[in-house]
Amino acid sequence: MMKIENYIGGEMVEPASGEYFDNFEPATGEVYSLIPDSDDRDVNLAADAAKAAFRAWAATPPEERFAILMRLVGLIERDLEPLAAAESKDNGKPVSLARSVDIPRAAANFRFYATAAMHLANESHDTHGAGGVHAINYTLRQPIGVAGCISPWNLPLYLFSWKIAPAIAAGCTVVAKPSEVTPMTAYMLSRLCIEAGLPAGVLNIVHGTGPKVGSAIVGHRDIKAISFTGGTKTGEEIARTAAPMFKKLSLELGGKNPNIIFADCNYDEMLTTSVRSSFSNQGEICLCGSRIFVERPLYERFKTDLVERVSALKVGDPNDAATDVGAIVSRQHFEKILSYIELAKTEGGSILCGGNVSEPPASASGEPLRGWFIEPTVIEGLPFDCRTNQEEIFGPVVTIMPFDTEDEVLKYANSVRYGLAATVWTENLSRAHRVASKLESGIVWVNCWMLRDLRTPFGGVKDSGIGREGGFEALRFFTEEKNVCVKL
Ligand code: NDP
């Protein structure tokens, strides 16, 4: 059985414990590789390697960092197919999605930050004080030191690179942990880093569980900043550990995103995108719209068309190009989603389509795949404040409900503890801006979904997190600022 290895100090190494645990393929439910069961000993080694590499890397000119990171981009693009296949096998997502979204976006993250680091500017101010005093104030931004990056399983390489790329480009060295559920592409990335000539210790990847490896990273004194993407509950725990050590924190957490549809929208575009924003990646994208609110005059038409489109989605082998919805990432998550479908029924919801474990689809060889598949599910008839409409399900399940007024839909949309993303469909320009400004959400898409511009800051409000990733914000996150005031 293939064994994944840690990447510490530029070398591929076994975990200190010598122990491994199983890595499952969601489509088959079978073990296909082994994950290092690392612990604080491995994190200590990784932090030591990162600390030892820091001074030299921080002093490396951005142009040289750029050259190394661009070599890495070239290697990711060269290995697009094997990386996409690994991402799909690890996560259960259709390989077509990994090929068109996850892996190209991972390469784009490295490319963007390789170039952005060359354009990071520091401000200076001409200061005139009382009595004719004249001074120049300037802000120096220097890499903060060793950074800890912890990422989830839903967009494995994409979100892993979203943290690592700005950290390394800014001149930090990194101790990183991918999700234990989807470690394969991070493992492949470590081999590509060696091939690209990334100096030893600049990036260290420690595989293992959150409670052992993740918490050791968060609690390590020499790790000065933590960039975390994952669940809100884990984020709370991380904040509790990191805050007394005054670490810099960026927390990208859960969501329960509204998709608001006004009757004057461009109907066809809205319908096609709403199917995608509900069920892409099996609904396991933090930005998916899981609560669909439809203005009453359009409700019945939308409901009929949505159910027809969703019923036609093909749940199938992730390797099949015709598959729309792949497997759920793990047995535990599969059971969680099913328990929410049961909850929706007890709360009075009507299942309009889906709602069941899917029949095992056939693999390319014709054998049934006995992994974790759930039919894409649409539910109606639930009040906006019930648990199904308030808690993050993170699967192929959406609820739909009608509304009559703007104020009413804003009340529904803003009623949750989360505030990550929202989508608004309307051709009325003033309404689009008005509703966008009143939504409690870090991101609002108007007449589109998941359109990304890497220059814009990204992140949630309320319990969806603190801090911003993306753009220059992410580079600045990995620096500390020093103000120097020189009297002339
Ligand atoms: P988790 O919070 O369970 O895990 C995220 C990462 O944290 C994993 O690597 C996990 O390790 C690790 N971890 C777990 N416990 C600890 C701990 N005590 N200390 C440090 N690290 C720990 O989230 P999921 O992996 O289940 O991801 C799904 C969640 O991520 C959803 O809530 C989703 O909304 C959110 N998300 C948010 C995004 C955003 O941009 N706001 C984007 C994508 C997802 P392990 O897996 O090994 O347990």
Image (cartoon, rainbow, N blue to C red):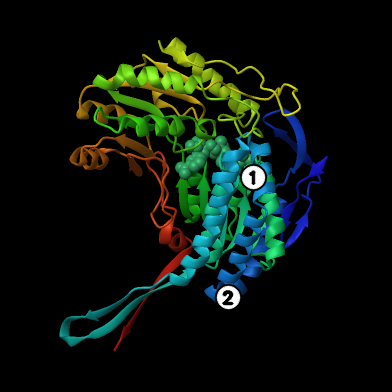
Q: How crowded is mark 2: few (under 14 residues within 10 Å), some or many (20 or more)?
A: few
Q: Name the residue located 64 percent from the left edge and 63 percent from the top edge.
A: 50
Depicted 224 relative to depicted 158: above or below: below
Horizontal side of residue 412 vs 238, given as left or right: left
Q: Within the image, what quadrant is residue 93 found in? A: top right
> Residue most toward the right?
1
Q: Where is residue 416 in the image (x, y as percent from the top left)?
A: 35, 30
State the quadrant of the N terminus.
top right
Name the residue type under label 1. Ala
Q: Where is residue 417 in the image (x, y as percent from the top left)?
A: 37, 33
Q: Within the image, what quadrant is residue 94 found in? A: top right
Q: Are marks 1 and 2 in contact (CB under 8 Å)?
A: no
Sooner in the amino-acid sequence: mark 1 or mark 2: 2
Name the residue type under label 2. Thr
Residue position marked by numbered label 1 in the rendering = 84
Q: Within the image, what quadrant is residue 305 found in? A: top left
Q: Which of 308 and 88 is in front in this view?
A: 308
Q: Residues within 10 Å of mark 1 (few under 14, many from 20)?
A: many
Residue position marked by numbered label 2 in the rendering = 60
Depicted 241 relative to depicted 297: above or below: below
Horizontal side of residue 309 vs 217, given as left or right: left
Asked whether residue 21 is in view, the answer is yes
Horizontal side of residue 50 vs 396, given as left or right: right
Q: Where is residue 421 in the image (x, y as percent from the top left)?
A: 38, 39
